[in-house]
C-alpha cells in the first residue's frame, strides 16, 4: 500500500505534533528582502529543483522524497489515487525543512475542485445557483478541510468559458458567460484564500486553465483552439484577469495552443499579457506533462528545447514531467538567462512566504480528521445542492405531496437511482460511501402518506414515477467528450415506459454536462436538472421534489435541442442575416435558453425604468424593475440585466449579461430591484483590446432569463 511505502521511504517517524506559533505575516518588503537573501545562497541545482513539481506516486516516492531532502523540489503534486495522511505530509515537509541545506519548505498542490472531504455540486452545477456567496462558502469549507489535511494549493477555480457541451470538462467551469465565470471565480478565490491564505484554514487558489482551453475544437479535449485575438481579450481572458485582481497567486497553463503556439510556450499570453500587462507576481504552473508535450505539438525537438521554450515564454514551474532538469545546462549555454531563472525562483519563494510556510511549515495533524465532513459542512452541502438544481419543466406534479399520490406510493427507477457516483470526476478526498443516493434521500425525505418503492424490477401502476437518469462520472470530465449529447436511448425508453404505467413522470437528470433532453419532453411531466450534486445529493433532491426547498437554479449554459446545433449560446454576434442563422430542419435556438429556470411560484416583471435616458461616457445610472411573486409560495428569483450596443466599431454580442441579483420574494409581494450601471459596463475593446465606451444607443434589458426581457433605451453622449 502506498502509505506503507511512504513510511518506508521516509523511515518510520512519528508525525511532528507541530506547535503552531501565530506569526505576523511578513510585509511585502520583508518578503522581497528574504527572497533576495535566499537567491544569493541557492546553488544553480537548488534553483532548478525549485521550479519542479513532481508527482508523488508510489513508483517515484523514493526519488521524489530523496530530492526533497536535497532541496531539489519546490512543490509536490498529490492526486486522488495516491492519498497521503497529514502525518506523512508533515514528514515529507520535515525532510525539506530540517534535512535540506537551506531548509526551504515545499508546498503541496491538489485538485480541490468542488470540495475536499465534503463534496459540493460540480462547478457548473454550483454556477446554476447564480449565488456568489454560496460559491464562496463552499470554497471556504473546502479550504478549511484541505488545509487542515496539509494541502497548500487548490488547483481551482477553473475559469474556462465554454460553449460546447460535447466537451466533458464543461462540468468544471461556470458555463458560457464571461461575467458569471468571472464572478464565480472571484467568489471561489475569496473562499479559498480569505484575506490571508497563510491562515491554517485557507489555501492558495490556482486559476486554470490559462487560456482558451474551453474552445477545444470539436469539443474534443486537448485538441487545438482557434480564437481571434479580439475574442481572446473580450471572452476568455476576463475571468482570469478578475481573479488575478482578486489576489490569486498562481495560474495553471492550459494544454491547448493559441494560433499555433502552445500555451506552455506562449510568451504573448504568459509574459506580455499575464505578467507585463496585468502585473501578475505569482507563478505560472504547467499542467500535467504539458511542457514535455511541446514536442508532441511539434514545436520542439526534445525535452531540453521544451524546457527552454517554456521558461523563456514565462512558465515558472513544471508539473509532473522533468524537462526542467535541463535548465542548469541551458543557463550555462546561455539559452536561458539567469535573470529569468531567478525571476521564476523568486516567484515560487514569494508564494511560499505568502503561504506562511517559512514560519509554519507543519500542520497540526492531530486535528485534521476532526475538520473533515462535519455535520455543518454536510448541511451546507445539502443547501448548496438544492440551490444548484434547475426546474426545467413542471406541469404541476411538483412539489409532490400526499394529495397528489392517490395510491400512497411513488416508484423510483433509473440507473442513477441507487448510484453513489454523484461527485463528478474530481472527488478530492471524498468517498462514494459518504454520498446519499437519490433513492435513499427520497425514501428518507418523503412526506407522511407517501411510500417510496423501487420500481426497477418491474414498472407498476403508480400515479407518480420518478425516473433518475443522466451520466456516470466517467462519461464526462477530462478526456470524456461525447459526439452525441442526447440522453441515451435506453434512458429515453425508460422514461417512455414509465409514462405508459404512470399518470405522472418526474425525470431527475444527474449529469455533468447539459444533455439534450428533447426526446423526453413529450413524456416528462416534470424535469429537474440535478447535475452531480456531491455528498448530499439524495437529500437535496428530496428537499426539492417534496417542496421543502423551492428550486431557484437557472442554467448558465444554453441547453440544446440537438447535438448538431453546437455551438449555440446566448451572446453570439448578429451577422448580416440573423434570420438564416439556422439549419434546414431545425433552428438555432436552444431547448432551454441561458438564464432559464422555473420555480414552484411565478414572478412578474413590471415597471422597468432607467434613472436617466442619457449619460456621458464616464457616467452612471440606475435601472430599476418591480418583481412580483404572483404565486402562493415564497421563492428566489434571479433577475438578469443585459445590454446591447446598437452601433459599434466592431460587431458585438447581440446581448450581454452585465449584472444579476438573486432575491427572495414572499407570495403576492412586490419588490424593487435596482442595478447600478456604470458606463464602463457598456464598453467594448478598441483596436488595442483596451476597453472604450463609444457614444450611441444601447438596449438595456432585464428579465428572468435571456429570452424573457423588458427593455429600455439608453443613450451615451
Ligand atoms: C490534469 C488537469 C488539471 C489538473 C492537473 C493535476 O491534467 O488538466 O485540471 O489540475 O492535471 O491533476
Image: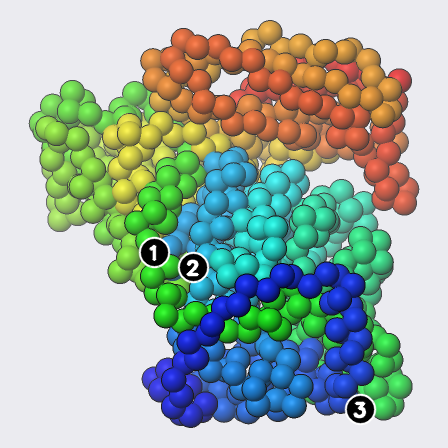
Residue at the (39%, 66%) spot, across then down = 368
The earlier-in-sequence mark between 3 and 1 is 3
Instruction: Identify the colour scheme used.
Output: rainbow
Q: Can you say whether 157 is above or below 48 in the image?
A: above
Q: Residue at x 76, y 11 (%)?
A: 612
Indicate which label's residue lies in the foreground, 2 or 3. Answer: 2
The percent position of residue 184, horizontal first and vertical second, equals 58, 43
Q: CA distance from mark 3 to mark 1?
A: 48 Å
**Residue 151: which numbered mark, if any?**
none
Q: In the structure shown, which secondary structural element does the residue marked by tag 1 occupy?
A: loop
Q: Is residue 538 above or below residue 12?
A: above
According to the image, label 2 marks what residue? 145
Q: Are marks 2 and 3 in contact (CB under 8 Å)?
A: no
CB under 8 Å between discs 3 and 1: no
Q: Which mark is residue 373?
A: 1
Q: Quadrant of the N terminus?
A: bottom left
* Quarter of the image with the C terminus in it: top right
Amino acid at each position: 500500500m502506498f502509505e506503507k511505502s511512504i513510511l518506508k521511504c521516509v523511515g518510520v517517524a512519528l508525525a511532528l505534533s507541530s506547535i503552531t506559533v501565530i506569526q505576523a505575516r511578513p510585509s511585502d518588503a520583508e518578503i522581497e528582502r528574504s527572497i533576495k537573501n535566499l537567491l544569493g545562497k541557492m546553488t544553480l541545482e537548488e534553483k532548478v529543483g525549485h521550479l519542479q513539481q513532481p508527482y508523488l506516486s508510489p513508483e517515484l516516492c523514493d526519488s521524489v522524497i530523496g530530492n526533497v531532502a536535497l532541496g531539489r523540489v519546490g512543490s509536490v503534486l498529490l492526486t486522488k489515487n495516491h492519498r497521503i495522511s497529514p502525518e506523512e505530509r508533515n514528514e515529507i515537509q520535515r525532510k525539506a525543512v530540517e534535512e535540506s541545506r537551506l531548509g526551504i519548505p515545499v508546498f503541496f498542490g491538489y485538485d480541490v475542485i468542488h470540495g475536499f472531504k465534503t463534496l459540493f455540486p460540480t462547478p457548473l452545477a454550483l454556477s446554476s445557483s447564480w449565488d456568489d456567496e454560496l460559491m464562496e462558502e463552499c470554497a471556504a469549507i473546502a479550504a478549511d478541510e484541505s488545509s487542515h489535511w496539509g494541502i497548500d494549493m487548490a488547483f481551482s477555480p477553473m475559469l474556462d468559458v465554454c460553449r460546447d457541451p460535447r466537451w466533458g470538462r464543461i462540468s468544471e467551469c461556470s458555463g458560457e458567460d464571461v461575467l458569471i465565470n468571472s464572478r464565480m471565480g472571484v467568489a471561489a478565490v475569496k473562499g479559498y484564500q480569505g484575506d490571508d491564505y497563510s491562515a491554517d484554514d485557507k489555501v492558495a487558489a490556482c486559476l486554470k486553465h490559462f487560456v482558451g482551453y474551453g474552445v477545444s475544437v470539436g469539443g474534443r479535449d486537448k485538441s487545438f483552439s482557434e480564437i481571434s485575438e479580439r475574442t481572446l481579450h473580450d471572452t476568455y481572458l476576463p475571468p482570469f484577469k478578475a481573479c488575478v485582481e482578486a489576489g490569486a497567486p498562481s495560474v495553471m497553463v492550459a494544454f491547448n495552443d493559441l494560433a499555433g503556439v502552445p500555451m506552455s510556450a506562449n510568451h504573448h499570453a504568459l509574459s506580455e499579457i499575464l505578467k507585463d500587462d496585468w502585473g501578475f507576481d505569482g507563478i505560472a504552473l504547467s499542467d500535467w506533462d504539458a511542457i514535455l508535450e511541446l514536442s508532441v505539438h511539434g514545436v520542439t525537438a526534445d525535452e531540453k528545447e521544451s524546457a527552454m521554450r517554456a521558461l523563456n515564454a514565462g512558465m515558472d514551474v513544471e508539473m509532473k514531467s522533468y524537462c526542467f532538469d535541463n535548465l542548469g545546462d541551458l543557463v550555462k549555454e546561455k539559452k536561458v538567462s539567469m535573470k529569468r531563472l531567478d525571476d521564476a525562483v523568486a516567484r515560487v519563494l514569494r508564494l511560499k512566504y505568502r503561504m506562511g510556510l517559512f514560519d509554519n511549515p507543519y500542520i497540526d495533524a492531530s486535528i485534521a480528521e476532526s475538520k473533515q465532513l462535519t455535520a455543518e459542512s454536510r448541511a451546507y452541502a445539502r443547501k448548496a445542492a438544492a440551490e444548484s438544481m434547475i426546474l426545467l419543466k413542471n406541469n404541476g406534479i411538483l412539489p409532490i405531496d400526499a394529495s397528489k399520490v392517490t395510491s400512497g406510493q411513488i416508484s423510483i427507477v433509473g440507473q442513477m437511482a441507487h448510484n453513489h457516483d454523484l461527485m463528478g470526476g474530481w472527488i478530492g478526498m471524498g468517498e462514494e460511501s459518504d454520498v446519499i443516493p437519490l433513492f435513499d434521500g427520497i425514501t428518507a425525505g418523503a412526506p407522511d402518506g407517501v411510500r417510496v418503492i423501487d420500481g426497477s424490477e418491474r414498472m407498476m401502476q403508480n400515479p407518480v414515477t420518478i425516473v433518475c437518469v443522466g451520466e456516470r462520472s466517467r462519461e464526462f470530465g477530462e478526456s470524456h467528450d461525447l459526439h452525441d449529447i442526447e440522453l441515451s436511448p435506453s434512458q429515453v425508453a425508460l422514461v417512455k415506459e414509465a409514462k405508459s404505467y404512470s399518470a405522472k413522470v418526474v425525470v431527475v437528470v444527474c449529469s455533468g454536462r447539459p444533455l439534450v433532453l428533447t426526446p423526453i419532453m413529450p413524456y416528462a411531466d416534470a424535469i429537474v436538472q440535478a447535475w452531480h450534486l456531491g455528498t448530499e445529493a439524495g437529500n437535496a433532491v428530496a428537499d426539492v421534489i417534496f417542496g421543502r426547498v423551492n428550486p431557484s437554479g437557472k442554467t448558465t449554459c444554453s441547453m440544446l435541442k440537438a447535438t448538431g446545433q453546437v455551438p449555440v449560446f446566448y451572446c453570439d454576434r448578429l451577422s448580416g442575416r440573423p434570420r438564416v442563422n439556422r439549419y434546414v430542419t431545425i433552428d438555432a435556438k436552444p431547448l432551454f435558453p441561458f438564464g432559464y429556470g422555473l420555480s414552484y411560484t411565478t414572478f412578474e416583471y413590471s415597471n422597468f425604468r432607467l434613472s436617466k435616458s442619457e449619460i456621458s461616457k464616464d457616467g452612471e445610472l440606475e435601472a430599476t424593475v418591480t418583481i412580483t411573486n404572483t404565486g402562493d409560495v415564497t421563492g428566489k428569483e434571479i433577475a438578469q440585466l443585459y445590454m446591447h450596443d446598437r452601433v459599434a466599431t466592431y460587431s458585438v454580442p447581440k446581448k450581454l449579461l452585465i449584472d444579476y441579483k438573486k432575491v427572495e420574494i414572499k407570495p403576492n409581494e412586490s419588490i424593487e430591484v435596482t442595478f447600478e450601471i456604470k458606463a464602463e459596463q457598456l464598453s467594448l475593446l478598441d483596436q488595442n483590446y483596451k476597453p472604450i465606451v463609444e457614444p450611441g444607443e444601447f438596449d438595456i434589458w432585464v428579465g428572468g432569463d435571456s429570452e424573457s426581457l423588458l427593455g429600455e433605451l439608453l443613450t451615451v453622449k
